[in-house]
């Protein structure tokens, strides 16, 4: 077997034999950010000297674009393949005018991602290394699994799944909070070639049943309850009602494997359906700790993940095995400058793509040690960093802004010295939040990877490589190797240089989704028809004179004021830069003269009351930073903003509130806290 240690999951060293066209880096992260090298703030940009620089990046990037097959197959060779791919490394049709959209990578090769994650790292001598540190609701409720232990747990479940008749290609729904059993279940499915579909355990029974109806799983894996703060949420009850609902729609599930989560609820208190419900603890530990892997084709499906799909039926984004494996492992390694000694913490939940690619697969493929707490609150954030000596911290702007709102003391009273790389994903990070993250959390010494990507892209697409080039707060900077972002105008023509427009991707990349489950037509219509010849991201973007990419928000959210197209992010960032503003969300409203006007919802820093004076100075802040045309017509004080369960601001609902269409608010049950909406309505002065 071609077994490689985690250190070998990397590009071959370019140095000694100077092979032509072999421009791949050895280790990008040679520089130590914890050293005394003080980064320089230079006109809004942070520059860190290090051995790997922009020039090196450009060389490698160019090669990845000129010769994707050579580039990616070299990297792919570091993984274990039972059988190598066909001569053609990839094939694609990204142009709807030329027929059905098709992306294929490493077709004909057979592999297994669970094998590459566990067995391969163990054979390389890392069996005793901690794979996952788990942290429960209470600080002393913690645990850990080494790679070897994780493999054994995965094998037991895989054997159980086989025993109950789950076969290659079958779907399995996983509705679990962040317990160890969640990544275990993902890896067990992958081991036997079953397709997992994780549903975030905050979704309602209705959302869950929609997903069950769509993918018709062989079984559902859940737990009886989970504690959020002091309250126990009865997940099993939610599953019960989702299963009743799906049965009404002709989809019955015969088996519900339930983890007994003792800290939240006792067995005896759990509603039970004999014959269908089985306790995980009663069956799984009795199965053998060894389980042969099912070798699958690189293009066999690995998982389905439903995006929220703000309108209509949720979209089942389908990812396959080989390309996804290579892409998540490589992006993880470079965008976070991963080293074997790192302790990595990503605050996402495995219910989201970030949890799939950058909690489970990317890090574990690299043999990394991952910290995975169950619902940490802000207060415990830095305790956890200090407890585990976290070196790489990956989070979302929403968390950064809420920490910022509470004040610096909550951060500065902790040590945090271990941190060397900070990273962010999910929304654009406003420059002032970026600076706070950089200055306060990172003590002005850690680079920030602002990673732009999507559920659909599988892995990050536009991102800094830590310290490799000067950063600009709020810009995701440059594309990752092999990714070709382009900005197009309304007619779909590529625009060059300094410009702003629609963000599209030209050419496939290994981590791309292959279809929407059961609906290839919708896949093509949503993503490939708007601009023929390209994958359309749905996001707006601009590029500055230095070639840096700046995400400006979703194009559906763009506001057109007197002919000026204004991205929501720009105005929001101007508001958030006001010292008393913690968070802001702007939407367009009808305006007799201007076509659209700007309506801004603002949350103030803890303890600051809203006043006429603040209102005026907020507007002034936007006028000064952008111009009079972008000045908000209305400022609406928002003690809190409506957010999705993954922490993103839901502008769809804010638009309805702003335009007083209160009876058309739509489904608010997908909000993390629906009561926020009533609060906002009560504070409106219509
Ligand atoms: P849905 O597509 O179902 O409405 P969603 O788009 O929020 O949900 P995700 O795939 O998790 O689901 O999020 C991807 C989107 O998040 C991107 O298209 C972009 O709008 C935003 N985003 C993610 N990371 C960044 C970033 N670093 N900077 C700016 N925007 C980002
Ligand atoms: Mg999206």
Image: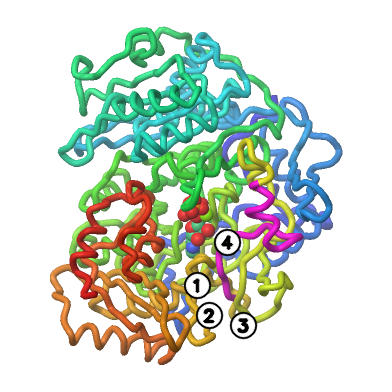
Q: Nearer the viewer, residue 405 or 646?
A: 646
Circles 2 and 1: CB atoms closer than 8 Å: yes
Q: Earlier in the sequence, mark 4 or mark 1?
A: 4
Q: Is residue 393 left or right of residue 119?
A: left
Residue at (55%, 26%) from the top-left corner?
171
Q: Which residues are magenta?
A: 522-542
Mark 1: few/some/many CA within 10 Å (<14, 14-19, 20+): many
* Element assignment for label 1: loop
Front one among 180 and 12:
180
Mark 4, residues whose alpha carbon is within 10 Å: few (<14), some, or many (≥20)?
some
Residue 536 seen in this snapshot: yes
Which-is-in-front pick, marks 4 and 3? 4
Residue bearing mark 1: 558
Disc 2 to disc 4, C-alpha distance: 16 Å
Q: Secondary structure at mark 2?
A: strand
**Quarter in which the N terminus is drawn:** top right
- Does 263 appear above or below 70? above
Question: Mark 4 or mark 2, which is nearer the start of the sequence?
Answer: 4
Q: CA distance from mark 3 to mark 1?
A: 22 Å
Mark 2 lies on residue: 565
For the point 31% across and 43% down, which residue is it? 388
What is the quadrant of residue 568 in the picture?
bottom left
Separation (CA) of disc 4 from disc 1? 11 Å
Q: Which residue is mark 3?
A: 545
| Residue at the spot of label 4 | 538
């Amino acid at each position: 077997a071609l077994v490689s240690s985690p250190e070998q999951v990397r590009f071959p060293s370019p140095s000694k034999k100077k092979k032509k066209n072999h421009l791949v880096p050895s280790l990008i992260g040679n520089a130590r950010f914890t050293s005394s090298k003080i980064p320089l703030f230079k006109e809004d940009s942070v520059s860190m000297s290090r051995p790997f620089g922009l020039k090196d990046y450009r060389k490698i990037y160019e090669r990845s674009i000129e010769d994707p097959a050579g580039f990616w197959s070299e990297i792919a060779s570091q993984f274990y393949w039972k059988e190598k791919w066909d001569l053609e490394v990839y094939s694609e049709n990204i142009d709807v005018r030329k027929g059905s959209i098709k992306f294929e990578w490493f077709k004909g090769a057979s592999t297994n991602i669970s094998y590459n994650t566990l067995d391969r790292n163990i054979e390389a001598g890392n069996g005793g290394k901690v794979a996952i540190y788990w942290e429960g609701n209470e600080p002393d409720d913690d645990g850990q699994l080494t790679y070897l232990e994780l493999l054994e747990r995965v094998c037991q479940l895989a054997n159980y799944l086989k025993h109950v008749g789950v076969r290659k290609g079958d779907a399995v729904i996983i509705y679990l909070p962040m317990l160890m059993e969640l990544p275990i279940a993902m890896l067990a499915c992958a081991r036997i070639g079953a397709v997992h579909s994780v549903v975030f355990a905050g979704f309602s029974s209705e959302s869950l049943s929609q997903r069950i109806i769509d993918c018709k799983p062989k079984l559902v894996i859940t737990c009886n309850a989970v504690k959020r703060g002091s309250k126990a949420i009865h997940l099993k009850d939610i599953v019960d009602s989702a299963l009743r609902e799906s049965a009404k729609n002709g989809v019955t599930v015969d088996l519900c494997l339930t983890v007994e989560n003792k800290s939240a609820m006792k067995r005896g208190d759990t509603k039970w359906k004999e014959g269908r419900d089985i306790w995980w603890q009663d069956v799984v530990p009795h199965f053998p700790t060894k389980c042969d892997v099912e070798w699958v084709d690189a293009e066999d499906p690995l998982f389905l993940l439903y995006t929220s799909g703000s309108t209509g039926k949720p979209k089942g984004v389908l990812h396959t095995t080989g390309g996804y494996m290579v892409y998540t492992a490589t992006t993880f390694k470079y965008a976070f400058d991963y080293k074997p000694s790192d302790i990595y913490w990503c605050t996402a939940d495995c219910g989201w793509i970030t949890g799939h690619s950058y909690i489970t697969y990317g890090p574990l493929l690299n043999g990394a040690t991952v910290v995975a707490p169950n619902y940490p609150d802000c207060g415990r954030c830095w305790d956890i960093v200090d407890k585990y000596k976290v070196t790489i911290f990956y989070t979302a702007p929403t968390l950064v802004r809420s920490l910022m709102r509470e004040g610096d003391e909550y951060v500065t009273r902790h040590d945090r010295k271990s941190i060397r790389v900070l990273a962010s994903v999910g929304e654009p990070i406003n420059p002032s939040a970026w600076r706070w993250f950089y200055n306060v959390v990172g003590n002005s010494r850690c680079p920030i990877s602002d990673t732009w990507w999507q559920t659909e892209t599988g892995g990050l697409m536009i991102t800094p490589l830590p310290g490799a080039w000067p950063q600009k707060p709020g810009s995701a900077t440059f594309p990752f190797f092999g990714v070709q972002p382009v900005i197009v105008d309304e007619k779909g023509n590529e625009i060059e240089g300094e410009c702003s427009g629609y963000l599209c991707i030209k050419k496939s990349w290994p981590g791309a989704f292959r279809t929407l489950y059961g609906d290839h037509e919708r896949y093509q219509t949503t993503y490939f028809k708007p601009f023929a010849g390209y994958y359309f991201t749905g996001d707006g973007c601009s590029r500055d004179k230095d070639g840096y990419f700046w995400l400006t928000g979703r194009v559906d959210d763009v506001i057109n004021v007197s002919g000026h197209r204004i991205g929501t992010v720009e105005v929001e960032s101007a508001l958030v830069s006001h010292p008393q503003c913690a968070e802001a969300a702007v939407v367009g409203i009808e305006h007799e003269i201007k076509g659209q006007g700007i309506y801004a919802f603002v949350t103030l820093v803890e303890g600051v009351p809203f006043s006429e004076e603040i209102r005026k100075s907020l507007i002034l802040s936007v006028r000064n930073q952008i111009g009079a045309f972008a000045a908000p017509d209305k400022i609406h004080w928002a003690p809190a903003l409506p957010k999705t369960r993954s922490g993103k601001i839901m502008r769809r609902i804010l638009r309805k509130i702003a335009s007083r269409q209160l009876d058309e608010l739509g489904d608010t049950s997908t909000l993390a806290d629906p009561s926020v909406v009533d609060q906002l309505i009560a504070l409106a002065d219509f």
